[in-house]
Amino acid sequence: DYRSLMVLPLNTQTRGAVGALTLVRTGAAAPFDEASLLLAQDLSRRCATAIGKAMLYDEVVRVATVFQKAALPSALPAVPGISFDAYYEPSSENMLVGGDWYDAFPLEDGRIAITVGDVLGHGLEAATWMSRLRNGFRAALFADVSPTRALEVVDRMLQVESREGFTTAVVALVDPIRSTLTCASAGHPGPLLWNGSGTITDPFEDRGLPLGFRNLGPVRSTSQTLDVRAGSFAAFFTDGLLEWNRDIAGAWKALHTALLRQDIREAAHPAEQLRSAVVTGSGHSDDIAVLTVRWDAMVSNTA
């Protein structure tokens, strides 16, 4: 029982026409007039703007998700007797991307290389640099299996690129045959180690200068190697885990307490469990990356 009808295009700025708005009057209602048309045109423009923004948001989310997945490892190494786990979460102020990273990959000699770092800043720009630095560490370690040398190479890369700001990073080597953990740091916290003794230690305290600042003074070799035994557990992390509510002392205490819990160390996904145990609020202004290593059993030195 149509009395009158209007069909108006929904024209978005980025996608063109994405649909139509149809308005109908039926029965005894008066037909549409010029004033009705003006109102409908304004309504169609508002609907098209809202739809266009929603489609653009969906596209940004998709691009950000694909970029972040490409910037982080698609899988962690599978090593008999050693379990790796990782968790990443961007700041609540930036959508899906951030400047923190974690990485773990096998080297030709059987050791596992680990890098964890934090690029100053947030959002897409920091994420872009994060991806470049992560790949830079991979290339440096494939060429020379030396954590200290890898830090030197990436620091030089930052100087050549003349990037403002700095980056903290830790480079580690897990040797499943010799049962050792080697680390070198550029101003980055951790890792914390539970070595089966009932206490948590912070064994790699010689942090060195952050990347981008290492030309400001002498840089000592900060590489250190520790023996680890069956049942040991190491937690690498970025400072977003400690600074989520600006109570760093409280976060350190919560992290130590969480690492003492056997149920967390032996969980299927201990990295996420650590994050949940330390970060109890609904939002945080910094990115969070956590990578854990659990030595379930050691490979014999004669293997």
Image: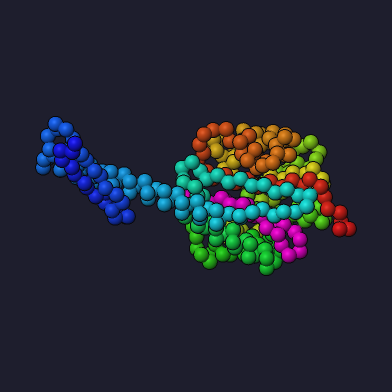
State the image coordinates of residue 56 (x, y, percent, origin top left).
37, 50
Q: Quadrant of the N terminus?
A: top left
Residue drawn at x 46%, y 51% is 62
Is residue 100 found left or right of 270 in the rendered image? left
Instruction: In the displayed orientation, state which residue is furthest to the front.
Output: 1
| Residue 126 visible in the shown view | no
Residue 25 vs residue 117, the one in the foreground = 25
State the image coordinates of residue 189 (x, y, percent, origin top left).
64, 46
State the image coordinates of residue 3 (x, y, percent, origin top left).
15, 38
Q: Quadrant of the C terminus?
A: bottom right
Residue 160 vs residue 40, the one in the foreground = 40
Relative to 255, say whether 134 is above or below. below
Residue drawn at x 15%, y 43% is 37
Is residue 63 found left or right of 48 in the rendered image? right
- The total number of labels drawn is 0
Q: Main secondary structure of the magenta part?
A: strand
How was the colour assigned to the protein in this rendering?
rainbow
Look at the image and say whether residue 231 sits in the magenta stretch: no
Quarter of the image holding residue 148?
A: bottom right
| Residue 108 visible in the shown view | yes
Residue bounds of the magenta highlight: 99-123
Residue drawn at x 14%, y 32% is 29
Look at the image and say whether residue 102 sits in the magenta stretch: yes
